[in-house]
Image (cartoon, rainbow, N blue to C red):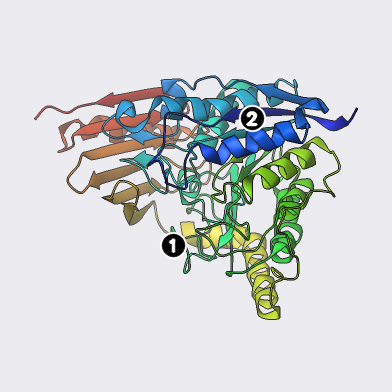
């Protein structure tokens, strides 16, 4: 009998009742083939690999993270409650030391969902990793968290949610945004004024192979994690960097994903993208599970795997090296860059236009952040969707100082006479969620 070196928990949730369309890449077969592979390979026969059934997240679990417009029920289906609940189930098993690590193989995915949600973006309605992280913080007192997103698409929603949080390190390794949705994740995106450097993007050129991906992990991600010293490491384990994926242009393999997982040693992995349903996902997921469990994966190969065919060119190698060098330079200079960003200003403003490609919605945001040396800073977001609702959303961070807490409450109270369809308060310092509809 095989034994897992690390006791590993798994949650499967294929979401039989949710799909954008019957033939869309994001459909239930993404996980059904993986389930078949796991059983065929006898992975559940390995002593120390344990399956859990997903629980539901609560309404408050979601509202700690998101401002759902017009309300939570318009944004989430039952499958979203269960998908996010699968991440919560694994988090509880890890935090309560029932297992050493865990992998939530769930859908729908979540890393393109921003803090404000008017609809679906990139197949994502709510951010299942962020909901899990904020539950962990509330339930177990965790503070410093690292999220390493290895999906081929930039994790712009997770970046948005933690843009102003100095206690959350968000690193995204992805195909360059000039060549792929969502068109973001550049080296210049390094976090808000109160959290400069805790957002780190590593955009890689098309046709990067495992050589380049693993180089980025070894040369940038691992040293930064060592400096940051998180209490827990989360891997947004998107699998669409695979050479056979139909909607991306990268050359990673199942063996490469397993090696990445061995290097990163995540406490929790959460499935994100990956749309080569038969050719990649069963092998990649099996590799990630074996690597997390500490079981030999050297025999793992896709039937059509040919390392010579997917080897990256010298130009790609040079590009990857320069990108990693610049990302590491940003990390080392984060203190000075933060001081410059906060210099001589009390409030920082950010205007954004956000497109919801799945639901064809344009959102316009005006954000105001209180500059603060003591905490992440309270902020408010004036958000309006074209043809939709106009809302004001106020966020008070969980470690808010007295001044930021008072400023956030003041914004919320003063907004009662404003011309908004709804006003939201996310007081994470007190774990209080409120909303109100102003009189006409």
What residue does disc 2 label? 142
Q: Which residue lies furthest to the bottom in this view?
A: 315
Asked if residue 109 lies left or right of residue 365, the reply is right
In the figure, 353 relative to 80: above or below?
below
For the residue carrying disc 1, how many other residues have a C-alpha within 10 Å: few (<14), some (14-19), or many (20+)? some
Residue drawn at point x = 79 percent, y = 48 percent? 300
Tag 1, which secondary structure? loop
> Which of the numbered marks, if any, corresponds to residue 183?
1
Quadrant showing the C terminus: top left
Can residue 428 be seen here?
A: yes
For the residue carrying disc 2, how many other residues have a C-alpha within 10 Å: few (<14), some (14-19), or many (20+)? some
User: Percent from the top left, x then y, of residue 146?
Assistant: 64, 43
> Which of the numbered marks, if any, corresponds to residue 390?
none
Q: Nearer the viewer, residue 9 or 23?
A: 23
Q: Nearer the viewer, residue 222 or 143?
A: 222
Q: Nearer the viewer, residue 437 or 314?
A: 314
User: Percent from the top left, x then y, of residue 313?
Assistant: 69, 77
Can residue 87 be seen here?
A: no
User: Percent from the top left, x then y, of residue 399?
Assistant: 53, 33
Instruction: Point out the tag, 1 or 2, that comes first from the N-terminus.
Output: 2
User: Percent from the top left, x then y, of residue 141?
Assistant: 62, 25
């Amino acid at each position: 009998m095989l034994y897992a070196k690390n006791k590993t928990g798994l949650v499967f949730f294929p979401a039989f009742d949710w799909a954008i369309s019957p033939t869309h890449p994001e459909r239930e077969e993404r996980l059904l083939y993986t389930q078949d592979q796991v059983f065929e390979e006898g992975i559940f026969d390995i002593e120390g690999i344990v399956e859990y059934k997903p629980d539901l997240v609560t309404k408050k679990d979601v509202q700690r993270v998101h401002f759902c417009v017009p309300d939570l029920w318009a944004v989430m289906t039952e499958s979203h409650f269960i998908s996010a609940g699968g991440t919560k189930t694994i988090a509880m098993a890890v935090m309560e030391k029932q297992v050493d690590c865990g992998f939530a193989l769930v859908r729908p995915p979540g890393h393109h969902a921003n803090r404000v949600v008017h609809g679906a973006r990139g197949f994502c309605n709510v951010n299942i990793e962020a909901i899990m992280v904020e539950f962990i913080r509330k339930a177990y007192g965790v503070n410093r968290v690292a999220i390493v997103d290895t999906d081929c698409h930039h994790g712009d929603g997770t970046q948005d949610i933690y843009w102003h949080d100095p206690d959350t390190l968000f690193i995204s390794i992805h195909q360059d945004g000039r060549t792929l949705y969502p068109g973001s994740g550049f080296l210049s995106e390094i976090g808000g004024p109160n959290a400069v450097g805790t957002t780190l993007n590593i955009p890689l050129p098309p046709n990067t192979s495992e050589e380049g991906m693993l180089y980025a992990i070894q040369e940038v991600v691992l040293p930064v994690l060592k400096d940051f010293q998180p209490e827990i490491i989360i891997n947004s384990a998107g699998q669409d960097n695979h050479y056979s994926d139909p909607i991306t242009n990268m050359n990673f393999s199942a063996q490469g994903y397993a090696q990445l997982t061995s290097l990163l040693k995540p406490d929790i992995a959460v499935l994100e993208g990956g749309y080569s349903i038969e050719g990649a996902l069963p092998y990649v997921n099996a590799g990630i599970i074996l690597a997390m469990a500490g079981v030999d994966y050297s025999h793992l190969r896709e039937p059509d795997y040919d390392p010579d065919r997917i080897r990256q060119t010298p130009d790609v190698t040079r590009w990857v090296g320069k990108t990693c060098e610049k990302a590491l330079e940003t990390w080392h200079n984060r203190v000075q860059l933060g001081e410059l960003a906060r210099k001589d200003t009390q409030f920082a403003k950010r205007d954004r236009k956000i497109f919801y490609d799945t639901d064809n919605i344009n959102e316009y945001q005006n954000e105001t952040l209180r500059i603060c040396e003591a905490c992440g800073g309270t902020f408010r977001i004036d958000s309006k969707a074209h043809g939709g609702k106009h809302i004001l959303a106020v966020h008070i961070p969980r470690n808010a100082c007295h001044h930021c807490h008072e400023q956030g409450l003041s914004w919320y109270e003063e907004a009662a006479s404003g011309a908004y369809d709804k006003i939201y308060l996310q007081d994470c310092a007190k774990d209080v969620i409120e909303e109100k509809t102003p009189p006409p």
